[in-house]
Image (tube, rainbow, N blue to C red):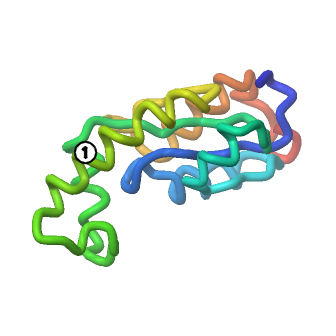
Amino acid sequence: MNAVATSIVLIGMMGAGKSSVGTCLQRRTALALFDTDDIVASKFGLRLGLTVWLDGNEEALFERASRSGNRPLLQVKSPRRSFARMLQARQPLYGSVADVRVDTSMLTDEEVALAILSKLGRVGANPATA
């Protein structure tokens, strides 16, 4: 996908920052944003826009995902082990559909948003026209 994309699809594990980064991107651009883990649709050719994989190391992602305590997928006997298995299974899928990958492990939400916009060639653009 090139820089003329009219929307951004954020994919990645829980805790990667899809909702938070999406909020930052909405403040900075007029692009349509999709917060979704429905990568099956993208894998089979439904292209809604630039697909950005918000990735991160397991430790950072798990720590963020488990903060609120209300993640149904982590309400299991061994949440860390379950998370690690999900991450391992999903990473190849995310990689196969992503146009862009951003490691969020050490970045703030704003820094991730700027990294995405940089990939689009839109850094420094007027927020109303970015």
- Secondary structure under the numbered disc 1 in the rendered image: helix
Q: Residue furthest bottom?
A: 70
- Is 22 or 71 nearer to us in this picture? 71
Q: Quadrant of residue 129?
A: top right
> How many numbered dots are placed on residues in this image?
1
Q: Position of residue 86 (x, y in %)?
A: 32, 49
Q: Who's the residue at 25% across and 75% down the image?
A: 69
Q: Is residue 25 left or right of residue 111?
A: right
Q: Residue furthest left?
A: 77
Q: Who's the residue at 41% across and 49% down the image?
A: 13
From this view, report whether residue 49 is shown above or below residue 121: below
Q: Is residue 129 left or right of residue 81?
A: right
Q: Amino acid at mark 1?
A: Ala
Q: Is residue 84 left or right of residue 52?
A: left
From this view, report whether residue 1 is shown above or below residue 86: above
From this view, report whether residue 45 is shown above or below residue 83: above
Q: Who's the residue at 53% across and 36% down the image?
A: 53
Position of the N terminus, as image quadrant, is: top right
Q: Position of residue 56 (x, y in %)?
A: 34, 37
Dot 1 corresponds to which residue?
60
Position of the C terminus, as image quadrant, is: top right
- Is 60 or 79 nearer to us in this picture? 79
- Is 86 or 129 nearer to us in this picture? 86
Q: Who's the residue at 25% across and 47% down the image?
A: 85
